[in-house]
Structures are given as structure tokens and as C-alpha cells.
């Protein structure tokens, strides 16, 4: 029964997102929109769990997911990604210009719809999109040279990923007259943990599971947390070897070496442990709220076996 309710809510958001694009009145935009692979809709799920089954909550969820979808269209251009969720990315199938403009249509329409929501909610979401963009800009800069600073990495993933999740949880709480600080903290920690797990899976999963080549991040110049922890533990020669692999497609020997070092330095385990600690922090932030479904999101995605 519960599953059925979730399914219906999810459907409402999906339908409203498509309706927003349909209402623009441009059939080509709608056709392209239908080609975008659908994601987990984590942000929508959070909003509906926190704010409840209201019309405003579904509206907020549809806006946030449109903005998030737009950001991934742009991100795939920036990362030169050829796949997204196991199928051809829009940039690969239709070209960079189409992907960028489709992203612009999605996020600007999202902002139009945002004006129908309370001012405080709109400001909160809009500010997070500024952070999101600054985070991506920082990610681009960091990819130009090997970064060994953990502080810089955490600042970047907070802005690039956690800020919109934080704003989703905070805005949903504002809509429902709940303690928005608690939910913002929950969202921030969930977002950070989520990005760290995403970064871990890039070095541990096969390309079949990921739907994109493994070690994509390092190839794209992204020194994510497992590499940062690994770098800390390597001797001088191994540090040199790691730097020589930066920004390129690894051959079999390099790929085996990388797997081995990520394991023996404890870098993967330490990254997972840190993500789990953030998961616990997220749970603590909402411990008095009695929302088992929000706790389940953390246990399903973060505090689990990897
Ligand atoms: C994915 O990172 C990217 C993001 C979470 C944010 C991207 C943000 C922008 C492009 C700026 C905002 C743009 C708009 C249109 C609002 P990733 O490359 O680490 O993850 P991936 O593995 O899913 O590609
Ligand atoms: Mg990317």
C-alpha cells in the first residue's frame, strides 16, 4: 500500500515536469525532453517525504528536478560524457549545442514555475543553483591539475551536489512549517555522503554496473576522495606513478595497479567510512522528527554494505 502511494506521488511529479515542458509549446523541446533518461528523483522523494502530499510540494519537487536534470545536461557536455544512466547522453546523441540549450530551457522554465512558490522557498532554491554553478566551475578548475587538498574537494562537492539537496530538504520544511535548519543539515550531510559514494563507486564498480567506463573521474581530471586518501598514504615513487595516470585512460596494468593501491592504502574503506559518518550526522539532525522514511533513505543509500 505504502509503495503504491509513493508511486502515485512520484507519477505526479513526473507528469508535472513533462507538463511544464509541454506548456512551453515547442514540440522539438518536448521530443528532446522525452529522450532524457529519468533518474532516481532523490530530491523529489525528499521533498515529498518532508512536506507531505501537497500540491505545493509536488510543484516544488517538479521545479527542483527540472533544474537538476538541466544541470546534468550541462555537466555531460562539460565532462564530455557519452552515456548517462547506461544510455546515450543527449550531448552525444544530438550534439553539445542541443544539450546546452535544452538544459537552458529546462532550468529557465523551472525558474518560471518557482515564482509560484513562496518567496522564501524560491530564494532558497535559487541561491542553491548559484552555489551549484560555482561548484561546477570549481570542479572544472580542479580538473586542470592534480588536487591534493581535501578541504578544496569537500568545498567543491558541497556546492556542486549537496547544496541543491540541502535546499530541497530546507525548502520542503519551509513549505510544511517545520524546523528548516534541521532538515537543511540532514540534506547537506546526505548530499555530501551521496557524492562521496558516487565517487567511490567510480573506482570500485565495473563499467557495466556504472553505465559509464570505470575510473572516469580520474580520467576527467577529478581527484576524488578515494584518490586523496590514497595519495596521503603512497610513497614517493607511487605518488609519481599516480600523477602519471592523472587525466588519461588507464591501460590494464595501470588499472590493476590503481585497484590494488586503492585497496591496500585503505582509501576506499576510509572513504566509505567517512560517507557513513556523514549519514549518521544526517540521521542525528532529524532524530526527533520521527520520519522513518527519511532514515530509510540514509540506510538504503549510505549506511549499507558496499
Ligand atoms: C554532476 O557531477 C554534476 C552536478 C551535480 C552539478 C552540475 C552543475 C552545473 C552544470 C551548473 C548548474 C547548471 C544549471 C543548468 C542549473 P559529476 O560529474 O561528479 O557526476 P556524474 O557522475 O553524475 O556526471
Ligand atoms: Mg559528470
Image (cartoon, rainbow, N blue to C red):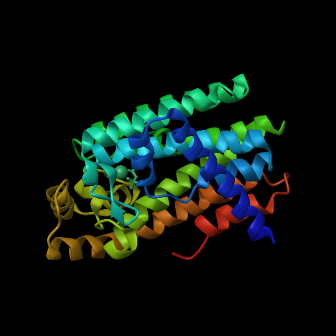
Q: Is residue 234 above or below residue 182?
A: below
Residue 305: % across, % down = 56, 76
Q: Is residue 208 above or below residue 44?
A: below
Q: Residue at x 70, y 22 (%)?
A: 119
> Could you say which is closer to the camera, residue 78 or residue 193?
78
Q: Quadrant of the N terminus?
A: bottom right
Please indicate whether residue 295 sits to the left or right of residue 102 in the image: right
Query: Ligand 1 is in which quadrant of the figure?
Result: top left
**Residue 44 shows up from this direction:** yes
Residue 68: % across, % down = 50, 44
Please indicate whether residue 249 sits to the left or right of residue 297 in the image: left
Q: Is residue 259 above or below residue 225?
A: below
Residue 302: % across, % down = 59, 64
Please indicate whether residue 211 sits to the left or right of residue 107 in the image: left
Please indicate whether residue 89 sits to the left or right of residue 196 in the image: left
Quadrant hosting residue 147: top left
Q: Residue at x 41, y 33 (%)?
A: 104
> Could you say which is closer to the camera, residue 119 or residue 250?
119
Residue 156: % across, % down = 43, 40
Q: Is residue 108 above or below residue 196?
A: above
Amino acid at each position: 500500500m505504502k509503495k503504491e502511494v509513493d508511486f502515485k506521488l512520484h507519477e505526479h511529479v513526473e507528469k508535472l515536469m513533462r507538463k511544464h515542458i509541454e506548456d512551453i509549446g515547442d514540440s522539438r523541446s518536448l521530443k528532446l525532453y522525452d529522450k532524457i533518461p529519468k533518474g532516481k528523483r532523490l530530491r523529489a522523494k525528499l521533498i515529498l517525504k518532508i512536506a507531505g502530499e501537497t500540491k505545493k510540494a509536488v510543484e516544488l519537487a517538479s521545479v527542483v528536478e527540472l533544474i537538476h536534470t538541466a544541470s546534468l545536461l550541462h555537466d555531460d557536455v562539460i565532462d564530455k560524457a557519452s552515456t548517462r544512466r547506461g544510455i546515450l547522453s543527449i550531448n552525444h546523441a544530438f550534439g553539445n549545442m542541443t544539450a546546452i540549450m535544452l538544459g537552458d530551457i529546462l532550468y529557465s522554465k523551472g525558474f518560471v514555475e518557482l515564482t509560484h512558490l513562496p518567496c522564501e522557498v524560491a530564494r532558497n532554491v535559487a541561491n542553491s543553483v548559484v552555489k551549484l554553478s560555482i561548484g561546477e566551475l570549481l570542479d572544472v578548475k580542479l580538473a586542470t591539475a592534480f588536487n591534493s587538498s581535501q578541504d578544496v574537494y569537500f568545498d567543491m562537492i558541497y556546492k556542486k551536489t549537496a547544496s541543491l539537496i540541502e535546499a530541497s530538504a530546507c525548502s520542503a520544511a519551509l513549505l510544511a512549517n517545520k524546523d528548516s535548519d534541521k532538515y537543511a543539515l540532514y540534506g547537506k550531510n546526505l548530499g555530501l555522503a551521496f557524492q562521496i559514494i558516487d565517487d567511490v563507486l567510480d573506482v570500485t564498480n565495473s563499467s557495466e554496473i556504472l553505465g559509464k567506463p570505470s575510473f572516469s573521474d580520474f580520467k576527467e581530471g577529478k581527484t576524488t576522495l578515494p584518490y586523496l586518501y590514497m595519495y596521503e598514504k603512497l610513497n614517493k615513487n607511487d605518488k609519481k606513478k599516480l600523477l602519471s595516470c592523472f587525466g588519461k585512460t588507464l591501460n590494464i596494468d595501470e588499472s590493476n595497479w590503481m585497484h590494488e593501491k586503492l585497496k591496500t592504502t585503505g582509501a576506499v574503506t576510509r572513504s566509505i567510512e567517512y560517507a557513513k559518518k556523514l549519514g549518521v550526522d544526517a540521521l542525528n539532525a532529524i532524530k526527533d522528527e520521527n520520519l522513518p522514511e527519511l532514515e530509510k533513505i540514509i540506510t538504503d543509500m549510505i549506511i549499507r554494505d558496499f
